Each structure stands twice: as C-alpha cells, then as structure tokens.
C-alpha cells in the first residue's frame, strides 16, 4: 500500500472510531430511562400529590416519563362538570368508572353509566366524559403514549 493511501486509511479509521466512541458516550450520559424498583413501581394514592384542576383534581399513577408506553391517571370531577370539551387525538384511551355517574360522548352519541364500567376511545375518535351525577365522579384514564 502506498504511504499516502496508508495515511488516508489510518485517518479514516481514527475518524470513524472517534465518531462511534462519541456517540456511545452520548447515549450513556443522556439516557432518561427510569430505573425501576419495587419502591417506585408501587404507587399508593396520596391526595397531597394530586394536581388540582378547575373541576376537581387528577392523580398520575404512571405518567409518560415513567412508563414505556401507557399512562394511568385518576380523575375526580365535580357534579355537572367535565375536564374538557369533546376532543380527539391519535392515542387510544380507556376510562374506567370507579365512583359516580359518567356521561360518555363518542362520535356524536352518548351513554350514561356508573361504577365498574369502562369506555374505550379508538384513535382519532371524538370523545369526552362528564359528571352526570350529584356526587363526585372518580375514574381511571389509561392512555397509550405515542412518544
């Protein structure tokens, strides 16, 4: 091999190694994946850690910063109110009624149901949930996070 080709090849190899090494280091230092332990994988409801909303409050059992794909939230809505107007998004979503009476809206139609009922919202379907009862509505929201 000619000396000039040997120098070019050596420089190319060194340059390639530098790129690979710097990318490996970057991956290690910028990782935001949580470390899962028995302590942070068990989440008992704590009202002091709940977030107050205009219509009640919400409590995240598992949010998108912690889970790999799905989130789990509990919402409490005061009588006659809803968290927001009907809307749609690309993620599918489940509601599971724990307490109270919910009115579920899906693509122009509604159903009213109580505890131990689930509602499924397919991706991009217009949907909403409101409190149709005289007591607080308590429900779980399970949503796929499309990171």
Image: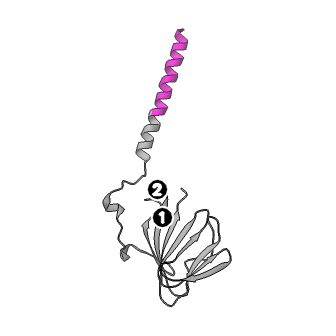
Quick check: 137 above or below 24? below
Question: Which labelled disc corresponds to residue 57?
Answer: none
Q: Position of residue 6 (x, y in %)?
A: 51, 13
Task: Identify the secondary structure beneath mark 1.
Answer: strand
In the rendered structure, does residue 33 fall within the stretch colored magenta?
no
Q: Main secondary structure of the magenta part?
A: helix
Q: Which image quadrant for residue 67?
A: bottom left
User: Residue at (47%, 78%) from the top-left corner?
Assistant: 116
Residue 118 percent location from the top left of the image: 52, 74
Displayed quadrant of residue 124 = bottom right
Q: Residue furthest front?
A: 116
Q: Is residue 40 left or right of residue 116?
A: left
* Residue 142 x, y percent position in the rendering: 50, 67
Q: Which residues are magenta?
A: 1-20
Q: Nearer the viewer, residue 7 or 32?
A: 32
Of all residues, the one furthest to the bottom in this rendering is 134
Q: Residue at x 48, y 88 (%)?
A: 135
Residue 26 against residue 92 in the figure, above or below: above
- Residue 123: % across, % down: 62, 64
- For residue 68, the mark is 2
Residue 4 within the magenta-colored segment of the rendering: yes
Dot 1: few (<14), some (14–19), or many (≥20) neighbours within 10 Å? some
Residue at the (52%, 65%) spot, across then down: 143
Q: CA distance from mark 1 to mark 2?
A: 9 Å
Q: Is the C-beta separation of discs 1 and 2 under 8 Å?
A: no
Q: Dot 2: within a 10 Å radius of its alpha carbon, few (fewer than 14), some, or many (20 or more) residues? A: some
Spot the residue most to the right.
108
Does dot 2 land on a helix, a strand or a loop?
loop
Residue at left 47%, top 85%? 136
Tell me the residue that label 1 is attached to. 71
């Amino acid at each position: 091999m000619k000396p000039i080709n040997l120098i070019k090849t050596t420089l190319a190899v060194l340059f390639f190694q530098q790129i690979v090494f710097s990318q490996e280091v970057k991956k290690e230092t910028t990782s935001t994946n949580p470390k899962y332990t028995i302590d942070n994988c068990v989440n008992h409801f704590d009202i002091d850690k709940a977030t107050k909303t205009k219509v009640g409050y919400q409590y995240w059992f598992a949010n998108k910063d912690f889970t790999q794909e799905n989130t789990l939230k509990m919402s409490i809505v005061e009588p006659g109110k809803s968290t927001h107007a009907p809307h749609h998004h690309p993620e599918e979503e489940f509601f599971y009624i724990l307490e109270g009476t919910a009115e579920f809206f899906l693509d122009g139609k509604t159903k009213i149901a109580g505890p131990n009922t689930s509602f499924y919202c397919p991706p991009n379907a217009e949907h909403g949930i409101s409190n149709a009862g005289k007591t607080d509505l308590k429900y779980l929201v399970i949503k796929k996070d499309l990171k």
